[in-house]
Image: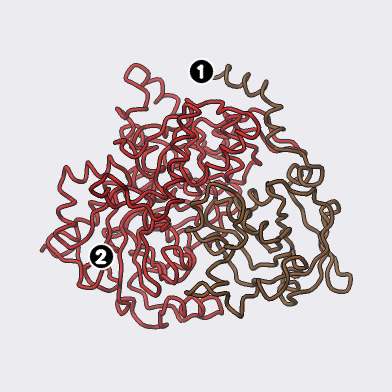
Chain colours: A brown, B red
Amino acid sequence: MSFEPFAVITSNTIVLAQNNIDTDQIIPARFLTTTSKDGLGKSVFYDWRYDAQGNLRPDSVLDAVPAQTHKILVAGANFGCGSSREHAPWALSDFGFRVVISSDIADIFKSNALKNGLLPVEIDDATHAALLATPGQQVTVDLETQTVVYGENQQASFTVEPFARRCLLDGVDPLGHLLNQMDNIQQYESARP
Amino acid sequence: MPKTLFDKLWEQHVVEPETEEAPAVLYIDLHLIHEVTSPQAFTVLKERGLNVRRPDLTIGTLDHSTPTLPPDQNGKLPYISAQAEKQVHTLIENCAAHDVELFGLDDPRRGIVHVIGPELGLTQPGKTIVCGDSHTSTHGAFGALAFGIGTTEVGHVLATQCVLQRKPKTMRIQFDGVLPKGSSAKDMALAFIAHIGADGGQGYAIEFAGEAVRTLSMEGRMTLCNMSIEAGARSGMVAPDETTFSWLRGRDYAPNDNDWEAAVADWRSLCTDDGAVFDSEVQIDVSDLRPMITFGVSPDAAISVDSPMPMGEDEAARLANEYMQFEGGQPFTTARVDRVFIGSCTNSRLSDLREAANIMRGRRVRDGVTALVVPGSEAVRKAAEAENLHEIFLAAGAQWRLPGCSMCIGMNGDQGQPGELVISTSNRNFKGRQGKGVRTVLASPATAAASAVAGHIADPRQFMDQEV
């Protein structure tokens, strides 16, 4: 899966306000038998979106609005906790999300998301509360300036790990960065007992 | 300057130190791979024309998608789907193509990745260990720096034997006191997660210390470190000591007799120096720790089994009670159990099975309760059968399965039915984790076994005092 360089995203939000939304909610384990990264979007939040017969629930928040105009997910604290499955950001990206905003995003999920063009944004509690309170609002997320603009020009700042930020902005490839270190890696190995 | 155990492990593995612009390049001594989180990483290798750089430091096993029921008359394993079977075969092919040692379907060394690493002696003090699995923290029990990574990073390690990492903060969780009879490492794990919260360890490398940790067996330490991630911490560790060394000695991949003394001398330096400073310190006294269970849908919603069901003071607690069908103020013994799962990388080792067997011996699983006992590895299965534990389980009416992750994640079809209450020795009580609509209660092997026998959530201590 390739991703477009990330600059500024202006889109509407979808809000899932619960705390501790774990990766089993984002993509249930039964969808993990795939050997590909593609096509997981249809199964994202499957058990929240579909009933026991596999019919889309009429109250599915994720399906009430078009994905093309709602690329920002605002979620409760500790989003993405649980397993290391990269299928979670693959599924969210494939569904159409480009940004996840929360007060607090689980470490492994955050690391995985950043490698797949899905920007995890951790913001202060007041901004978080404001975004949770108004689903559907238009929000601008600027990775270059690391700011979120919402409501009537209200602004909040966030920080993204600088290397991951450069990777997203400039298309720097982390594996390429590691491969460029091969001399150092070999040196390290030869210096070990 | 005094250093923490974590600082020592980190410094020994830094190839390139971190800077403002870039994370550290951290060398990995052992890379464990399994069928679920590796196929897409091998695809990237193929696309970029790369090889596995250190197949000798890479080990594969099959555990998540593998059936725990035996093959049929034609030797065919009952996979949940053709896709699951394909996933298993993809790892077999990838390992063969890249010269990676795989403990495959018929291999007596096969088992859950976090069970076999230690039992084969692959897991050793001082190593950095990664796996595309969040419970890689388990290996920290040996004084290793071990953490879960995503599939992209699995590809990085396959190609370069390194990962890019920012140095985490450090937290010490000190368990003081003597653990009372009836309580176990699982209860300590649930207690610390409840104490610091499901995100309380986020951004930290945890070191578990104190008298109650020193007196734990290696299996107990593994259970404790295993659940670090349920508090959001990617790694948990225990400084190695005589318990560690004697457990490792003689294992297949452990240093042999010629190298043993030198290895142990090295390992002895792996401890936190007096006066070393942690970013966060937590103290928990276990003297009164009673058997713990979870009551909600996050592992930090844990309480002692003899407490009344919580009232659901806030919205989240109310929703948890609603999902779990628990009524505030009632005793947990009123909750009827449908299914019991004894297994997973948290609690599927020989000592866990003994703990469960001690309660099931001479008793019957209550009518209407389905109990699954799933050993963590072929070696555990063999050892358990050698001491007839399987006979105890089978005589009690429980099922004795083949090794694998089984109902912890339910990928292979071992699942509960919607609405069922499952008492599980695994690590996650997330909604639907063990099957759509399944209500999961996490507990120790003793509590799970006691609940299987009682037919409702039960305090194992009442079964421990009476011989049958």
Residue furthest front as drawn:
B74
Q: Residues within 10 Å of mark 2 (few under 14, many from 20)?
A: many
Q: Which residue is mark 2?
A: B460
In screen coordinates, is A116 left or right of B108? Answer: right
Q: Which residue is mark 1?
A: A193
Going by the numbered disc 2, the residue's amino acid type is: Pro
- The CA span between labels 2 and 1 is 49 Å
| Quarter of the rendering containing residue B356 | bottom left
Going by the numbered disc 1, the residue's amino acid type is: Pro
Q: Quadrant of the N terminus of chain B?
A: top right
Q: Name the residue at 46% across, 77% down.
A: B323
Q: Name the residue at 88% across, 74% down.
A: A152
Q: Position of residue A162 (x, y in %)?
A: 76, 44
Q: Are marks 2 and 1 in contact (CB under 8 Å)?
A: no
Residue furthest right as drawn:
A153
Q: Quadrant of the C terminus of chain B?
A: bottom left
In this rendering, the count of numbered labels is 2
What is the number of the mark on residue B97? none
